Image: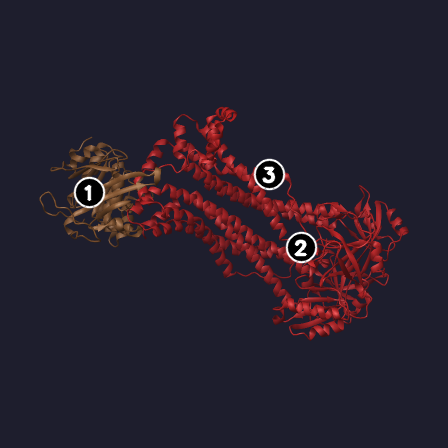
């Protein structure tokens, strides 16, 4: 698995703004930087302002939790950071690259090379085994996909379950396969949309443990959730309401995943 | 192998019945294309080889100074050979006593002619040492059981002249024994050809020189057939020739060409229907798969998969299904083509058939199969590529529509009475009624399957109905006589009265026919001019408008095909070229619409004026006949025997013999229709199976919820069945309309001056066809309903999470 320390230093490329100084005055390397990012769906009277002028800086290697009720704009924010959609206005910089300027092909390449996604409903291909589901995405990044896929499954504790089909796995196992799929291509940024939303407490904790371990390896992890309890394990908690970031709080002592409860 | 390919293979195997249904449709389409098209090509090329080997005439010029015509033709570049001969239509008597008007054709004794050679099948060729020896053409030889040594007779000089059969022969001119373009379907035993030495032919015809020139072109000349035909015809006309018949118009060749054209038509129809059906099935199955995979596709897009990769993935599904059906289909097509060619050759009595495997046909079949799969998969594949990656953020949502068109229409129910009616409709009925409108696109595909199946069924069944109606029109409405007597001379009132006294005979009328070429504005059409007495009871003159009219006192009634061929309308003047170099100018009194042949009709008095009676022989071209009707319940065989024995009667032809022959052909047609019904049923089953099973699969959650709410399996099955059959019944309406139109188009391809079909499909046929498709639909949904009965909510939830 890759480590954050191996990643090239971020610099102000593609016209991206310089990161803001950190609390200690040093300039931290920003994994994600948003400046006035907005997203509006529809036009005129039917316009829905899903995200309004969001400013956010996520340093590399942090575990960030985005909290908020349904419709607060957290998934939209994740979509913009993941290059799934472009912002209507403002700037989104990831890994020092302004992705708000990319076209569809550029965003596809960005997602392929930089981002790993984990979704609430796992979204596994039912006709492929666990290992094949991981390989399917790993193949995108070239040779060694088989070894990397096996290693990714091992990293989420499913080395022995690679030959099982999704329907033969529990919900937690399916979500861990989804995480393995996300990390098999060694992304710098792991974006998780309600990764425990469809899981019970114990299974959810297991998944959070895996995410915390991946973050411990130096990878930036952003988790969208409406479950406030998960905030306790984050380095940084972003609270959202009605499409706006209403609070960004640092957590000096993130709790281990095993202590999270809801 | 990439994991995406693994997914493709597993997806294909996931619902094997749907895949098999698509593969079967593609296979049938490709196989039937290959069989029909190659059978057509085999037969066509077989004919061409025979034509070349036996030097089948490219142009036949009748009448005039044949020596000068032959010399002029031989001098024309592009002409390989000419042959002058004598041809005469005369009464003939077979060893069993049967009589008919047959054809005598002169040939060089001792050597084959330069044009229109024959293949001696049995016995020996003509020899100058046996001047009364004849070669019997295969069809008459088979029917009359003529063997070398058998004795036949021809009517010559007012008496029967005995002739000895030296052998039997096949002729390219009579591969199909059509007497003329007006009599392209002679009943067996009603026509026959005898090849005789040229001097004997001239004696029988009462001429001193050949009356026909057959011209054979070089390969280079055949490349400019139209020009050469026109040039030689013009030259021949300058030497007094009457009729000029091209190879394409030669009656036997034209009839066979029309017949095998059916194979070419089927080669278009079959792939069109089956591959369209396969396309519908591929589209439905794949569109459902894309709808089901939306979240996975969104995930793949979010993970960095390119659009074209996803397009290729789903396109490959269609291509795989197309290929899986096209390969066995192409192989089956090759095998079937050989079998069909041989069976057809045996049925027609072709001396030999040629079967070859054409790489181009195989490639085209494979191409059609692949194209059907690919084209049908293209839209779902493109729709997959359009799935936004944000779709991955959503859970699985039902792709079925909302309230549906019916519900939107239901807003009208807010108004007074409609509102009360709407409230009175039970919820189950609303479910049934709204289902098809909610899944409108799916309903359209279901309906298109119904339409395709009904088109296939009706084209075959409708052709059977129309053919039977055509036979009925000819023999019940147009042609009213029971027998036609060829007379040694014109029948006077006394002779007719005597004929009417024969036991079993109710009425007798005089008639006469003469070969004539109708010309107008430089265009010409060779036909038979038939004369009836005014107010004839033996023939009804049906008009193109659907009515009937009387025979005009002056002018001629022309078969409707002549309207287009000559470019004339009622009231126009036309010229008749008659045997012996006579011509007559007359007026087109109107047109008649008759199923068999394109004749010219006039009064007997006009025929007498234009072609005075000269006896029943070929030189004058006039044949005097008496048309008789039998009394109800008469013994037809006894009556015909008695009539044949009457003085002056030289041949008796049962006018209903052709009807019996055609009724016999209808039995073959029943087999064809049964096969088409089976194919149509299979087509309907596979398309409906695909659409209905997808429909049920898509609504699995909804139906499982109803079951969980306490709706019994049987009630649910009834509701779903009613909903499905409602969609099928609605689809049957355009299916029946399009089926009828397709039948008309298909029959129209066979319409010519030889035969004219009207689309005439019985209401019962329409009803049974619709019921058959409904029955097939009922069966096609059974597997889906069984799956519905087996499903449980727990499994459904688990599947959703996967």
For discs 1 and 2, the disc positioned in front in the rendered view: 1
Residue shown at 39%/26% (left/top)? B709
Q: Could you say where residue B464 lies in the image, as x and y percent from the top left?
A: 64, 46
Distance from disc 2 to disc 3, alpha carbons, whole Å, reads: 31 Å
Rendering colour (chain A): brown
Numbered tag placed on residue B396 in the rendering: none
Task: Name the colour scheme.
Answer: by chain
Q: Describe the element under mark 1 as helix, strand or loop.
A: strand
Q: Could you say where residue B221 lies in the image, as x and y percent from the top left?
A: 63, 71
According to the image, label 1 marks what residue? A56
- Output the letter for the chain in red: B
According to the image, label 2 marks what residue? B752
Q: Are marks 3 and 1 on the same chain?
A: no
Could you say which quadrant of the image residue B120 lies in?
bottom right
- Asked if the residue under mark 3 is in contact with the one under mark 2, i.e. CB atoms within 8 Å, the reply is no
In depth, the one of B468 and A32 nearer the eye is A32
For this orientation, the residue located farthest to the right is: B494
């Amino acid at each position: 698995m890759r480590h954050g320390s191996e990643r090239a230093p971020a610099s102000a490329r593609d016209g991206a703004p310089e990161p803001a100084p950190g609390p200690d005055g040093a300039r931290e390397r920003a994994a994600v930087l948003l400046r006035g990012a907005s997203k509006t769906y529809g036009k005129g009277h039917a316009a829905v302002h899903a995200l309004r002028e969001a400013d956010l800086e996520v340093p590399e290697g942090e575990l960030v939790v985005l909290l908020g009720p349904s419709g607060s704009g957290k998934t939209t924010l994740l979509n913009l950071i993941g290059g799934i959609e472009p912002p209507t206005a403002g700037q989104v910089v990831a890994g020092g690259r302004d992705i708000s300027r990319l076209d569809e092909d550029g965003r596809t390449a960005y997602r392929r090379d930089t981002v790993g996604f984990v979704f609430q409903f796992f979204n596994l291909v039912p006709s492929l085994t666990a290992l094949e589901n991981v390989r399917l995405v790993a193949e995108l990044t070239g040779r060694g996909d088989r070894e990397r896929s096996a290693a990714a499954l091992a990293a989420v504790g499913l080395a022995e379950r690679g030959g099982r089909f999704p329907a033969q796995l529990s919900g937690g196992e399916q979500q861990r396969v989804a995480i393995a799929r996300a990390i098999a291509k060694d992304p710098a940024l792991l974006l998780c949309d309600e990764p425990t939303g469809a899981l019970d407490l114990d299974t959810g904790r297991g998944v959070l443990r895996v995410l915390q371990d991946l973050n411990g390896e130096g990878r930036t992890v952003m988790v969208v959730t409406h479950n406030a309890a998960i905030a306790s394990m984050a380095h940084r908690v972003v609270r959202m309401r009605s499409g706006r970031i209403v609070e960004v709080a640092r957590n000096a002592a993130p709790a281990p995943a095993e202590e999270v409860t809801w | 192998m990439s994991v995406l390919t693994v997914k493709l293979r597993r997806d294909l195997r996931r619902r094997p019945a749907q895949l098999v249904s698509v593969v079967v449709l593609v296979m049938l389409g490709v196989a039937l294309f290959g069989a029909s098209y190659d059978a057509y090509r085999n037969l066509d090329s077989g004919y061409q080889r025979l034509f070349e080997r036996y030097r089948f005439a490219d142009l036949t010029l009748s009448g005039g100074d044949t020596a000068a015509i032959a010399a002029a033709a031989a001098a024309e570049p592009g002409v390989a050979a000419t042959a002058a001969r004598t041809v005469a239509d005369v009464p003939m008597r077979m060893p069993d006593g049967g009589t008919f008007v047959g054809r005598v054709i002169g040939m060089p004794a001792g050597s084959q002619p330069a044009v229109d050679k024959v293949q001696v099948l049995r016995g020996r060729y003509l020899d100058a040492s046996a001047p009364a020896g004849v070669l019997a053409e295969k069809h008459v030889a088979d029917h009359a059981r003529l063997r070398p040594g058998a004795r036949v007779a021809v009517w010559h000089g007012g008496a029967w002249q005995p002739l000895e059969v030296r052998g039997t022969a096949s002729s390219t001119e009579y591969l199909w024994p059509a007497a003329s373009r007006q009599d392209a379907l002679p009943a067996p035993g009603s026509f026959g050809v005898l090849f005789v030495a040229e001097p004997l032919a001239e004696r029988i015809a009462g001429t001193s020189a050949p009356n026909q020139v057959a011209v054979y072109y070089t390969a280079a000349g055949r490349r400019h057939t139209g020009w050469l035909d026109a040039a030689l015809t013009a030259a021949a006309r300058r030497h007094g020739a009457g009729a000029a018949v091209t190879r394409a118009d030669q009656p036997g060749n034209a009839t066979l060409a029309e017949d095998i054209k059916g194979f070419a038509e089927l080669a278009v129809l079959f792939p069109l229907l089956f591959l369209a059906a396969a396309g519908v099935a591929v589209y439905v199955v794949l569109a459902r798969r894309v709808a089901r995979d939306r979240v996975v596709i969104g995930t793949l897009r979010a993970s960095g998969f390119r659009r074209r990769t996803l397009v290729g993935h789903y396109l490959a599904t269609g291509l795989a299904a197309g290929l899986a059906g096209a390969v066995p289909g192409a192989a089956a097509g090759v095998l079937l083509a050989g079998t069909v060619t041989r069976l057809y050759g045996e049925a027609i009595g072709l001396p030999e058939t040629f079967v070859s495997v054409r790489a181009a046909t195989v490639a085209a079949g494979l191409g059609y199969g692949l194209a059907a799969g690919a084209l049908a998969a293209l839209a779902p594949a493109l729709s997959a590529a359009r799935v936004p990656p944000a779709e991955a953020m959503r859970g699985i949502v039902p792709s079925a529509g909302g309230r549906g068109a019916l519900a939107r229409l239901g807003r009208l129910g807010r108004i007074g009475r409609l509102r009360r009616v709407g409230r009175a409709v039970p919820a189950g009925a609303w479910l049934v009624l709204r289902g098809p409108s909610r899944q409108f696109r799916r309903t359209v595909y279901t309906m298109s399957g119904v339409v395709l199946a009904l088109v296939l069924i009706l084209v075959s069944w409708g052709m059977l109905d129309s053919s039977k109606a055509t036979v009925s029109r000819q023999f019940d409405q147009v042609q009213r006589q029971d027998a036609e007597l060829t007379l040694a001379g014109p029948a006077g009132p006394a002779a007719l009265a005597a004929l009417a006294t024969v036991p079993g005979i109710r009425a007798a009328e005089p008639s006469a026919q003469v070969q004539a070429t109708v010309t107008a504005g430089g265009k010409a059409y060779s036909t038979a001019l038939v004369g009836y007495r005014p107010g004839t009871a033996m023939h009804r003159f049906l008009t193109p408008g659907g009515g009937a009219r009387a025979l005009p006192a002056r002018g001629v009634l022309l078969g409707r095909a002549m309207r287009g061929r000559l470019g004339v309308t009622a009231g126009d003047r036309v010229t008749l070229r008659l045997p012996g170099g006579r011509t007559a100018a007359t007026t087109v009194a109107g047109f008649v619409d008759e199923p068999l042949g394109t004749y010219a009709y006039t009064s007997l008095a006009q025929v007498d004026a234009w072609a005075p009676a000269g006896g029943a022989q070929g030189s004058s071209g006039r044949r005097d006949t008496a048309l008789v009707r039998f009394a109800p319940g008469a013994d037809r065989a006894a009556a015909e025997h008695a009539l044949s024995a009457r003085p002056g009667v030289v041949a008796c032809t049962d006018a209903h013999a052709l009807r019996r022959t055609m009724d016999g052909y209808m039995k073959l047609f029943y087999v064809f229709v049964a096969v088409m019904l089976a194919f149509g049923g299979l087509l309907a089953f596979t398309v409906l199976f695909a659409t209905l099973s997808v429909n049920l699969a898509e609504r699995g959650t909804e139906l499982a919820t109803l079951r969980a709410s306490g709706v019994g399996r049987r009630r649910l099955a009834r509701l779903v069945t009613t909903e499905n059959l409602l969609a099928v019944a609605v689809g049957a309406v355009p299916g029946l309309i399009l089926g009828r139109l397709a039948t008309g188009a298909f029959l129209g391809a066979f319409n010519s001056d030889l035969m004219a079909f009207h689309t005439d499909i019985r209401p019962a046929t329409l009803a049974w066809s619709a019921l058959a498709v409904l029955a097939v639909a009922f069966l096609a949904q059974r597997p889906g309903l069984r799956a519905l009965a087996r499903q449980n909510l727990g499994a459904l939830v688990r599947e959703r999470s996967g």
